[in-house]
Image (cartoon, rainbow, N blue to C red):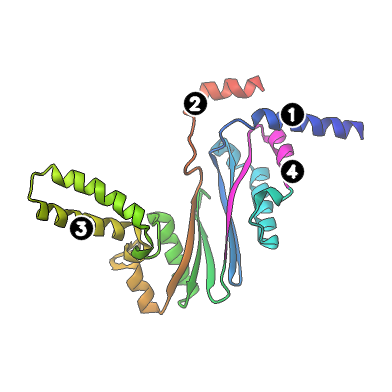
C-alpha cells in the first residue's frame, strides 16, 4: 500500500511539473449513435506521443465516457488519476481540451475522422442517406466552412470584413459608388467562401453543397469541426532542445 501511495504521489508530481507545457498535438475522437454524437479533442505535446497506443486508448475511453454520460462538463469526467499515470508513462503533458455534443432525434448524426486523426467532423443531417452525410462531413473536414448558411454569419463579422474591403477599395481612387459596389461584391464572395451550402462540393466543383443536398432531399442541421491544436499558441522549439528538456525530467 505504501509503495502504491508513493508511486501515486510521484505520478502527481511529474504531472504537475509537465502541466505548464503546451500540449498542442494529439488526436480527435468521436462516437455516434441514433440521433446523438460526441466529438472530443485530447492533446499531448508531440505527434510521436499522439500515435502511442496507450494515449489513443485513453482518448477512446474519454470519448466513451462523454458519450455514455452525455457529459458536457469535462471537469466532471473523473479521469484525473488515469491522466496523471499516463503523463508519467509517456513523459508528456496530456490534456482533455474540449468536447461537443450534437443531439437531434429528428436527424441522422454522422461523424468523419481524417486518417491521421488530426481533423474530425460531427454532423447532423435530416433526409438523404449515410453516403451523402459522409461526403458532406468529408467536405467540411477539407474545406473548413464556418457556418451552414450565409445568414448565420454574425452582423459584427460581416461589418468587420466590409470595413477591411472598403479600406482596400478606397485605395483604388475610384468614385464612392464604385467603391461600394466593389465592397458588396467582396462581401458576397466572402460569405460564399465560409458558408457550407455555398461552397463548391469537394468531389464535384460544378455543384454547390446546397444543391447537392436539395437534389437528395437533405437538409444540413448543424456541424462541428475540430482540428488538433487550432487556436493554441505553439512554442517553436528545435528537436535538440526538446531532447534536452526530456532528459532533464
Q: Is residue 1 above or below residue 61?
A: above
Camera-side residue: 233 or 181? 181
The Cα–Cα distance between marks 4 and 1, rounded to whole angstroms, is 14 Å
Decide which of tag 1 and tag 2 comes sooner along the chain.
1
- Residue name at image x 91 percent, y 31 percent: 2
Question: Which region shows up in magenta?
Answer: 79-102
Q: Position of residue 222 (x, y in %)?
A: 47, 65
Q: Position of residue 144 (x, y in %)?
A: 40, 54
**Mark closer to the observer (4, 3):** 3
The Cα–Cα distance between marks 1 and 2, rounded to whole angstroms, is 24 Å
Cβ atoms at labels 4 and 3 below 8 Å apart: no
Decide which of tag 4 and tag 3 comes sooner along the chain.
4
Element marked by disc 4: helix
Q: Which numbered tag is attached to residue 237?
A: 2
Quickly name the residue at label 1: 13
The answer to whether residue 29 is left or right of residue 15 is: left
Quickly name the residue at label 4: 82
Quickly name the residue at label 3: 184
Q: Is any atom of residue 40 visible in this view?
A: no
Decide which of tag 2 and tag 3 comes sooner along the chain.
3
Decide which of tag 2 and tag 4 comes sooner along the chain.
4
Q: Position of residue 129 (x, y in %)?
A: 48, 75
The answer to whether residue 7 is left or right of residue 185 is: right
How would you rate the neighbour count of disc 3 (Cα within 10 Å): few for under 14, some for 14-19, many for 20 or more? some
How would you rate the neighbour count of disc 2 (Cα within 10 Å): few for under 14, some for 14-19, many for 20 or more? few
The answer to whether residue 188 is left or right of residue 26 is: left
The Cα–Cα distance between marks 4 and 3, rounded to whole angstroms, is 54 Å
Element marked by disc 3: helix
How would you rate the neighbour count of disc 4 (Cα within 10 Å): few for under 14, some for 14-19, many for 20 or more? few
Element marked by disc 1: helix
Cβ atoms at labels 1 and 3 below 8 Å apart: no
**Mark closer to the observer (4, 1):** 1
Amino acid at each position: 500500500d505504501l509503495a502504491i501511495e508513493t508511486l501515486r504521489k510521484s505520478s502527481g508530481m511529474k504531472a504537475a511539473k509537465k502541466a505548464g507545457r503546451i500540449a498542442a498535438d494529439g488526436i480527435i475522437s468521436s462516437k455516434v449513435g441514433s440521433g446523438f454524437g460526441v466529438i472530443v479533442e485530447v492533446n499531448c505535446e508531440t505527434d510521436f506521443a499522439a500515435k502511442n497506443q496507450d494515449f489513443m486508448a485513453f482518448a477512446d475511453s474519454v470519448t466513451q465516457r462523454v458519450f455514455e454520460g452525455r457529459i458536457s462538463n469535462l471537469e466532471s469526467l473523473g479521469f484525473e488519476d488515469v491522466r496523471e499515470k499516463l503523463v508519467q508513462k509517456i513523459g508528456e503533458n496530456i490534456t482533455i481540451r474540449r468536447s461537443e455534443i450534437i443531439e437531434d432525434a429528428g436527424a441522422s448524426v454522422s461523424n468523419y475522422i481524417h486518417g491521421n486523426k488530426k481533423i474530425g467532423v460531427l454532423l447532423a443531417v435530416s433526409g438523404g442517406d449515410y453516403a451523402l452525410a459522409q461526403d458532406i462531413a468529408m467536405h467540411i473536414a477539407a474545406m473548413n466552412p464556418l457556418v451552414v448558411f450565409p445568414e448565420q454569419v454574425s452582423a459584427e463579422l460581416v461589418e468587420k470584413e466590409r470595413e477591411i474591403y472598403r479600406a482596400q477599395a478606397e485605395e483604388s481612387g475610384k468614385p464612392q459608388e464604385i467603391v461600394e459596389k466593389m465592397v458588396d461584391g467582396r462581401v458576397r464572395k466572402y460569405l460564399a467562401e465560409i458558408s457550407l451550402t455555398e461552397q463548391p462540393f469537394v468531389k464535384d466543383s460544378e455543384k454547390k453543397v446546397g444543391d447537392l443536398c436539395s437534389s437528395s432531399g437533405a437538409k444540413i442541421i448543424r456541424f462541428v469541426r475540430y482540428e488538433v491544436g487550432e487556436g493554441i499558441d505553439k512554442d517553436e522549439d528545435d528537436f535538440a532542445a526538446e531532447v534536452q528538456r526530456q532528459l532533464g525530467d
